[in-house]
Amino acid sequence: MHRIASAFARRTALMPYLTFGYPDAETSLACVQAAAEAGADLIELGMPFSDPLADGPVIQHSTQIALENGITVAKCLQMTTELRRRGVVLPLLLMGYFNPIFSYGVSRFTRDAATAGADGVIVPDLPMEEAAELETACRECGLSLVYMLAPTSTPERIESVAARASGFLYLVSVAGVTGERQGWPEGLKEFVGRVKQKAATPVAVGFGIGTPAQAAEVGRFADGVIVGSAVIKAAGGAQPVEAVRQLVSDLRRAL
Amino acid sequence: MTPTPLSNSNGKFGPYGGQFVPETLMPALAELTAAYTSARADAAFHRELGRLQDTYVGRPTPLTHARRLSAQLGGAQIYLKREDLAHSGAHKINNALGQALLAQRMGKQRIIAETGAGQHGVATATACALLGLDCVVYMGTVDMARQQPNVFRMKLLGAEVRGVESGTKTLKDAINEAIRDWVTHVAATYYLLGSALGPHPYPTMVRDFQSIIGREARAQILEQTGRLPDTLIACVGGGSNAIGLFHDFISDEQVEMIGVEAGGAGVATGKHAARFADPAVGRVGILHGAKTFVLQTPDGQIADTHSISAGLDYAAVGPEHSFLRDSERAFYTSATDDKALAAFSTLCRTEGIIPALESSHAVAEALKRAPTMRPDQIIIVNLSGRGDKDLDTVMKHL
């Protein structure tokens, strides 16, 4: 069974997000290992970009630091290889804006990502209309190109995106950028339900989920829960590895 | 408005353009494209825009024969398309008013915009005041410091100016922040993008609203001289004033079209914003929703740019310019900060016109080319804005 599919098959999947190279290269790797040990089912790994226009301040800051630490696309791929060498067996999803991938070379990127041991790619500024080249290149290398859907997506778009989905569908819980939020967007459950009707893949929800209670609530109707900014905040503290381990473990227990 | 086709249905100019934006915005872009397509075909929309252009903006703007300058250079006759005389001091009002009317037609009360030099912010604040719309302008704090008078102007006009502290704190970061705002408030907000860049339909729509520049200039030069110009020159940041001047001349193949990018401290120094000049850093990439030429590092990070003029200090160029450059219908060159400053001074003294530093880049290219041409030849320079906003900067250098 495909690694991503089996990650969703067992239980409500938990996918923490970490930025490659934040707070520094070695600590980011240790945080991934800690998250894996603490009960993550998949891990989303951010490749930094100078202009992350879908991200809120917390993730923006982490990618800025990563860039200052000299993290490049090539280094992200090397770090992916290193994670596999260290025995991390969970599905790893590489999240990056399109320009660095395009600059690296789309087919070169998918080939090297697959070789490094990645399972999929998430590109927040690449809607399906622009994704043909990357989608084909991913398919040829056995990678999933994970598409996003938003509360603004029309029924027609939901149907078209769902038909092209690979791995899982990434639902943005609320119109906006990444970051923790108080309260809960109305209609999220209904939105997830609408997408599930059309989707042959699992449906995971991200953006705005930061606490175990929020994760538990979303986990009742979604196949997976994605937690980004809260994990990055933990990784940015005094004891990054322990804080990430604790948060992931709390999230896991709540699900 | 000339019934030229929209760029093809997915918003591409050859391989350039497109819609590289988060999924959340795709339905908003579809809504905008539909609304613009309908407005574009509606005579009432054009009547209202035309009325405001005549009675509020002060169009048509003059085409001025720069006689002393031409005589001094001893070559081609230089004509200046006087967008500096448009209300609010630059060509930016053409687009701001067009899009603000569209926003009103779409029932969107809240307008957001980005600004670099502040001219687009001022134009948007002006249009919003005129039409009674709410206005938020994002501006990098570096740009706020160097364009203080425009910040004050926007506030006077009732706009809220939000300083942007992220990244390089200039135009590209202001666009990032405006897009983040738009993603968050997409249902009730209209993003009034200021140049011929960004995702489809903006490059086409902004070009259409700016094409009045070339349409007027073409009629004016025919009326004044009985012939078409030999050369058009315009500065190119995002490229809206240039595409506005060029558009109506594109099928006049004998008319040469020159875009002038910001050469900063010199292309060789790496401190510039000349996307077409240096293949080591200016390569095809994706920024702010469009595939086009982008200044970037070997790793695909957006490069820092430098120009004395905030309005040209941007890492990407409008996608239609990339297409015109590939097809060799237009040619692109650059002028350094120093050449732009020299041209600024020359124009002040020979013609009594204080140009914007952006426009001074186009003037610099005219100063270079005119002496190599015959006196019966004609250059039209787009004087895209006035220089009052730049006096602080210029006083430091001259």
Image: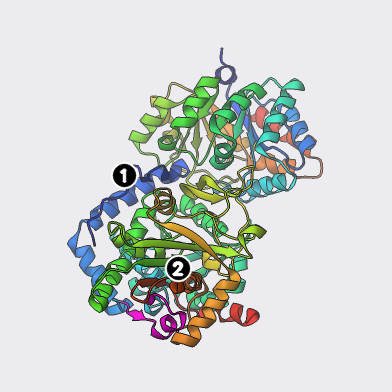
Q: Are marks 2 and 1 in contact (CB under 8 Å)?
A: no
- Amino acid type, label 1: Asn
Magenta stretch in the rendered image: B61-80
Above or below — where is B182 with respect to A145?
A: below
Residue at position x 66%, y 26% from top? A40
Residue on which disc 1 sits: B8
Q: Residues within 10 Å of mark 1 (few under 14, many from 20)?
A: few
Asked if residue B62 is among those painted magenta in the image, a careful observer would answer: yes
Q: Is residue A203 visible?
A: no
Q: Position of residue B207 (x, y in %)?
A: 35, 59
Q: Residues within 10 Å of mark 2 (few under 14, many from 20)?
A: many
Residue on which disc 2 sits: B120
Residue A94 located left or right of residue B371: right
Quarter of the view holding residue B126: bottom left
Q: Which circle, 2 or 1, is nearer the viewer? A: 1
Mark 1 chain: B
The quadrant the C terminus of chain A occupies is: top right
Q: Could you give the CA–CA distance between mark 2 and mark 1, rounded to whole angstroms?
A: 27 Å
